[in-house]
Image (spheres, grey):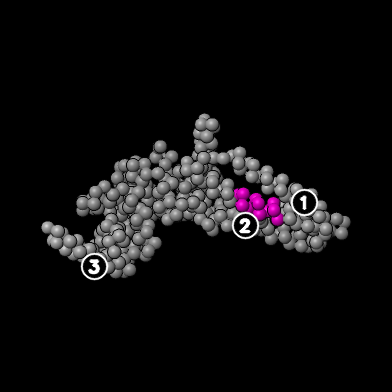
Amino acid sequence: MIGKWKPIESAVLGLLAQRPAYGYEIARLLRAGGFGEVTGGTLYPLLRRLEDASFVTSSWRDSDDGPPRKYYEVTSAGREETARRKAQWEHIRRAVDDVFEVTS
Amino acid sequence: MTHSDWIDRLVVALRHRGVDGERVGELVAEIEAYLRDSGSTPDSEFGDPADLADQLVGRAGPEPKSQLRLGVFVVASSIAWLSIFGLLGAGEDGRVEVTVGLLVAVTLWTLGMAVFFVWIMRSGGRVWEGRERPRPRIQIGVFWVVLVASVVAFVVLPQTELFDLSNTVLWALAGISISHVIAESIRQARQARLSVPPAASPHGEGLIGRWTGIARLRTGWRLGREAYRDVDRTE
């Protein structure tokens, strides 16, 4: 189960479940959230996978600060997937906490 | 690598993988928007264009469907030429005698050329991306092997007549194959044309009308020439 856990992908889904965002904005939010330097080369293939899986959709929109940008937002299937991954994360965290408690 | 050189390489890499012009235009516009926001260079932000194309398309190498299409295109072109030659060389009664030798030679030639061109297309893409060393001598050698094998088959195999092809059948074959060649050429030209969604046009201004099919050939030619020049230097 832990092997299939994809932290950055799950974080992107979680961010987009809160509100739609464009590529660079997602990278900035991930950096601010402590995920380190996430480059466009990591982010775009990931967004493509989420889009292919119908977890997110995208559309070009006018932006308040500058030229139009492509915004990503989660679909209803994406919301279900986000909830599933959240539950999965809770399970992983509990399992790791238990191991650390035994060893400490 | 300059910004525009990087974008050129990404466009060619995506087209090699069978991504149509509309999709390529949108991807490039999106990447341009990201780079404008981040202020970084394409190299540092997205890495190697061919690797990015692999990850975006989800596989390496050209789409199997586009290889099949190319194979069918080459077979149709060969049938078109052979039908025209058949019509020109038909006897006074307007019929062409098909012998064992002719049938085997024609089949060898059309299938051999189809496989040869698919191979050239696949390896050409890898050479342009610097993933494979160009092997022009081997490719020319393979072409000659197919040609000589076809001629030998025609000369050596028995000239026993199998069946006659009438003028009508030849015209029908020529008509069908030429129609396919024209339709496929138009389809390819349309697909190769890059377009950017109107909403994204500020990021793709330079793209519109710039990278049409001809421009793609120009970029491909330039990248290919660079790759072959490097081989000449190392040999």
- Quarter of the rendering occupied by the N terminus of chain B: top left
Give the CA separation, mark 3 to mark 1. 70 Å
Q: Which mark is residue B72?
A: 2
Q: Is residue B94 left or right of residue B62?
A: right
Image quadrant assignment for residue B86:
bottom right
Q: Which residue is mark 1?
A: B154
The local crowd at label 1, few if under 14, some if 14 to 19, many if 20 or more residues have their Cα within 10 Å, is many
Asked whether residue B204 is in view, the answer is no
Residue type at the position of mark 3: Ala
- Chain bearing tag 2 is B
Residue type at the position of mark 1: Phe
In the rendered image, residue B139 lying in the magenta stretch gets the answer no
Asked whether residue A102 is in view, the answer is yes
**Depth check: B152 or A18 in front?**
B152
Q: Which residue is mark 3?
A: A87
**Depth check: B147 or B55 in front?**
B147
Q: Which residues are magenta?
A: B107-117
Answer whether labels 1 and 2 touch (C-beta < 8 Å).
no
